[in-house]
Amino acid sequence: MSFNSFGRLFRFTSWGESHGPAIGAVVDGCPPGIALSEADIQPWLDKRRPGQSKFTTQRREPDEVRILSGVFDGKTTGTPIGLMIENVDQRSKDYSDIAGSYRPGHADYTYDVKYGFRDYRGGGRSSARETAMRVAAGAVARLVIPDVTIKAYLVELGGDPIARAAMDLEAIDQNPFFCPDPRAAERWAAKLDEVRKEGSSLGAVVECVAEGVPAGWGAPLYAKLDAELASAMMSINAAKGVEIGDGFEAARLRGEQNADAMEPGEDGPTFRSNHAGGVLGGISSGQPVVVRVAFKPTSSILTPVPTVDRDGAASEIVTKGRHDPCVAIRGVPVVEAMMALVLADQKLLHRAQCG
Amino acid sequence: MSFNSFGRLFRFTSWGESHGPAIGAVVDGCPPGIALSEADIQPWLDKRRPGQSKFTTQRREPDEVRILSGVFDGKTTGTPIGLMIENVDQRSKDYSDIAGSYRPGHADYTYDVKYGFRDYRGGGRSSARETAMRVAAGAVARLVIPDVTIKAYLVELGGDPIARAAMDLEAIDQNPFFCPDPRAAERWAAKLDEVRKEGSSLGAVVECVAEGVPAGWGAPLYAKLDAELASAMMSINAAKGVEIGDGFEAARLRGEQNADAMEPGEDGPTFRSNHAGGVLGGISSGQPVVVRVAFKPTSSILTPVPTVDRDGAASEIVTKGRHDPCVAIRGVPVVEAMMALVLADQKLLHRAQCG
Amino acid sequence: MSFNSFGRLFRFTSWGESHGPAIGAVVDGCPPGIALSEADIQPWLDKRRPGQSKFTTQRREPDEVRILSGVFDGKTTGTPIGLMIENVDQRSKDYSDIAGSYRPGHADYTYDVKYGFRDYRGGGRSSARETAMRVAAGAVARLVIPDVTIKAYLVELGGDPIARAAMDLEAIDQNPFFCPDPRAAERWAAKLDEVRKEGSSLGAVVECVAEGVPAGWGAPLYAKLDAELASAMMSINAAKGVEIGDGFEAARLRGEQNADAMEPGEDGPTFRSNHAGGVLGGISSGQPVVVRVAFKPTSSILTPVPTVDRDGAASEIVTKGRHDPCVAIRGVPVVEAMMALVLADQKLLHRAQCG
Amino acid sequence: MSFNSFGRLFRFTSWGESHGPAIGAVVDGCPPGIALSEADIQPWLDKRRPGQSKFTTQRREPDEVRILSGVFDGKTTGTPIGLMIENVDQRSKDYSDIAGSYRPGHADYTYDVKYGFRDYRGGGRSSARETAMRVAAGAVARLVIPDVTIKAYLVELGGDPIARAAMDLEAIDQNPFFCPDPRAAERWAAKLDEVRKEGSSLGAVVECVAEGVPAGWGAPLYAKLDAELASAMMSINAAKGVEIGDGFEAARLRGEQNADAMEPGEDGPTFRSNHAGGVLGGISSGQPVVVRVAFKPTSSILTPVPTVDRDGAASEIVTKGRHDPCVAIRGVPVVEAMMALVLADQKLLHRAQCG
């Protein structure tokens, strides 16, 4: 089966391939009466838009979104919101030479095995191009949870982490890496530029924090807030790992080290620490929700790699075309979007049962 | 909302609390004609059963499963399979003293906020007791994918990892830690015994490998094999992180290091490495599917921790009762069960669209 | 696939066969804090219980329901509610003779074709016995919509309709037919007794009215209130037709005859008629929701009918055992239960999006 | 909640309003490798297209469908199929005068109550315009079940039924009513023309027969083939009743009259009659699947009807604009489409569990 819908009550369904005429999404279940126009969505798409620095693919896509339904007199009507972005800069020829061979690390082989053939143009459906619609749908989701602030950034690139002490959220939008540590950003720029010139790529880790999430969101047991976040993040192209709160580091702590002590606060109980990442028993605790996502290095590289062709014969491949030397960079707005989509859905789920 | 069902086509729904009369599950969508009896389920439950060593809770539960429907003449009929386990050793008094306070790291506070009150006996619904039904349902799932072999084990405990070179799958069942490295098992035994006596706990990392998964299973884009696994694993009590293949380590590799080169094989293309963990573009590649899950240390510890009571007043809590000093140990059969449930579901999903 | 769950947010999953050890259901998504005990469910089960008159099967089932989870201190906790009824009076021998032949009108043939074999004891999963769990789950649903009053009754039996002018809801519980017209009840008694003695059966039509449903419930376009009701009612054993409001009669009216004129009322707009049956555009209008369900005559009859056996050879069958000469009678509480389940679900759906 | 998706595995999601820039749908879960182009869809849309006779609305819509994704080299890829139709002939002014009042029989009032306001242009989302996408998606569904033949037609208009003896399927496409009885078509033409001139409307009954459905399709208990059909048909605008097989007439038969006797046939068991309409226990029997749908008369009429305005004041309304004097006529291709969508879904569901 192909399951191109995400969410349970605030649900979006995406469609489209990298080199088709357009990509789109349907956002269903959005509450009515919310002010919405293209202007609320475009800025988030612009954050993700390619070609903004030498560290992202040079494909030129304006990524202009159109709202085709679900909005009347500037407000959501409660009916499905149709969104569409026309593909403009499609250089299919770039890909014609890889139609017959499997690019290691890509979905070429698995799509062929599963479906019998594939749309090889730019990776077709498996292209990160689809994430533009996640960002668009996420922009709508943000309007459903206006009191929640979502911020994602890179905390590690090519194995080089930021200095937590030097973290400055203001810096995030002042470098091409969404990096909160200016000095790390400088190191990354030098390193990634070098790697880029060598035709290789690097992996990175994105951290996302959602503040303002009230305690009580989460649908135990199999739609737990953290389980939904894990699914959402792992569904992003190139994602290989997800952590909530301390994540794998928590596995190295003792019980008393990991315990987030509580104390009385003016507006109810507060916590002295947040090892849990804002989720207890799959339900939000009122603390910031913290997620980290590991992205593998871009699989499209100029270094020749042994592979096989569609006939099963040995081959070697060099992936030309326009690629991101570090997909995690443009993954930042996508991670934010998935966080928004999960939280908007959980808000509605909570309201349904306990509202 | 409360979503106590897992799976899309091979779906199971669990019910029951730690200290209620019983816990149970309904397995829906199971193919007909599969030989099934309690004898196919009980061994897996026994692996998870508490009280088998000093490293797991001393609660004594026989965990005898009964099949109440869906089987006729020893074979599944295609109708829902009702499973039930009666709770036997319930010492509610153990928990009466924590009815009014919130145990840090537990779901006490969040359940109270979400639902207005909670069944505090043994954690009620949020207790790991529910995982017994996952193991039971997972045992049925294994029968749906007979060609797949699933094996989970601990690869790290309290920050002390096994030696990969010393890995011996035979050793897994010869120590109380499901540890494939005998010497690590010895170190862990000494350390955990000490920690246990101190009334504390340790976290650990479980690795699970599924061999025999054919290429082509996976439902892009939002029911990708890896996204489903991430959701399944993160829904397990105390899980804080999930990795597929190299996971976070992949974020530290360069493109050519991470690329799994392919070459012709007797039965089709083969891979020279498995950094991807058997999943490409959300679809199985035919390689072993590799997942790792990070478990935090048990939150129930004897060390006093500051907290608040239901009235919001400052308090301090010591969690008595019978607890696992390392919940990850009994998490091993649960991780295997979730892997089986995801794969059985994906097998049916694939058959539906491409069968 | 087997889909044994009903509802989207207020969802119940049933399991069990006619002659297994027990039948049960899991009610998931119920709001927390609702007072609930077996005493809230049993009366509805008693209405449906067999053996209460010569016009229903003589099978003796106490149908005593047990709540196994989801309730603490007498209130729902928001976690899944496990319900179970043990089967007591199972005379499997009654059915052994039909194991090899297909009873016309029954699911014997189709279950065999679909699943390869079947649990023939009392019809197994296809038995109306399962409807006991619908009634139990429906009793919980009623508590979620306390302001809604649901009443079902027979309006036609064996082609003999009640006199609308003579309708008296008080009379419903004063005859074995849930008939609101005492004189029709007398005619039906005479006729059905005769038919019963001849070993035959009759069909009937059940009408169900829900009052107190606020305007605004309904999830267009594919979970419209009327579409959900149609699905719910048609899923009941022996149901062959569903009408909303005037139903098929509406197809015989002119536009101006069918129009429900509106006028100002003290509490907002009111309607001068209710041809629509309380649903406009799939959303409740605030008028009574009116549904009618056609039940075919019981397929189990003593009249010999030509059929084939499992080997495909010509045969003839007489269905012994204990059967209802008119299944629609015991269908009345089931229709009420399905109405309650749909409305509770729609209430939560509405609250989620517009709450 | 707004649920604009239909189907479980072969699922389509529609979006768009009567007077927005476009309407569209996403067909997800379609098997790969099926030849598909606009030419496979357009003919079905043309059957439904308005303005083809004086008996349908004079709105002029070319209804040209575009496939925007999911097809490569002329074949479905297994990824979501994006479909879009641009709205051309939108005369919003026609509707401006009814923005403030509620048209009886329409969704105006209920949408306002549910969502707080509504897109009143042509009924917005509640307009029958959306059914164009059902027809488009249904055209794709037909390709998934190539051995199934689906035919719908009017069997009754304004209370005047066809003569079953005179039924001639060839005649269906030779009159503007999809009527299989030429003489009835003549009577209907005279009557409807008169009613149309009087500014009124008539209801009608559509019958749909699917031949070639193999025995075994259907997902008991809550996704039974007949329950899915009931939901599908009742979700169509103006539908008020659904029957399977003999439907309400079955409620007037005795057991032996209703029993479909079986006998040995060359390709397995055959039935001597089809009172059941091809469904037993929610599973197809191999006989033709027969459904009937009752459509109320168009609510948009020129006869003044008392109503209230948005402020709750008494008012009177005459619905100008371009309307169908009998919506059931254009409902015929929609009923066929919903039949195809349900059957394609059930085919995949069956293959998943029993394939």
Image (cartoon, coloured by chain):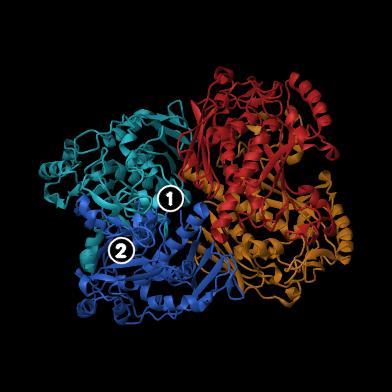
Chain colours: A red, B orange, C blue, D cyan
Residue A82 in view of the camera: yes
Q: Position of residue D184 (x, y in %)?
A: 12, 45
Q: Is residue D47 above or below residue B31?
A: above
Q: Nearer the viewer, residue D269 or B112?
A: B112
Residue at image mark 2: C293
Q: Are marks 1 and 2 on the same chain?
A: no
| Left or right, residue B237 beside residue B181 | left
| Left or right, residue C157 beside residue B4 | left
Q: Position of residue D98 (x, y in %)?
A: 32, 43
Give the CA distance from mark 1 to mark 2.
27 Å
- Please state which amino acid type lies under the numbered disc 1: His
Instruction: Tell me the crowding category of disc 1: few under 14, some 14 to 19, or many 20 or more residues within 10 angstroms, Cα based.
Output: many
- Please state which amino acid type lies under the numbered disc 2: Val
Residue at image mark 1: D350
- Quadrant housing residue A97: top right
Q: Is residue B56 above or below residue B178?
A: below
Instruction: Tell me the crowding category of disc 2: few under 14, some 14 to 19, or many 20 or more residues within 10 angstroms, Cα based.
Output: many
| Left or right, residue D178 beside residue C234 | left
Q: Is residue D73 above or below residue C260?
A: above
Check the picture and name the quadrant holding the N terminus of chain B.
bottom right
Q: Position of residue B156 (x, y in %)?
A: 81, 50
Q: Position of residue B53 (x, y in %)?
A: 79, 66
Q: Nearer the viewer, mark 1 or mark 2?
A: 2
- Quadrant housing residue C177: bottom left
**Helix or strand or loop: what does disc 2 sit on?**
strand
Q: Is residue A145 above or below residue B100?
A: above
**Helix or strand or loop: what does disc 1 sit on?**
helix
Q: Which residue is painted at 39% across and 43% down in the image?
A: D125
Q: Which mark is residue B28?
A: none
What is the chain letter for disc 1?
D
Residue B77 in view of the camera: no
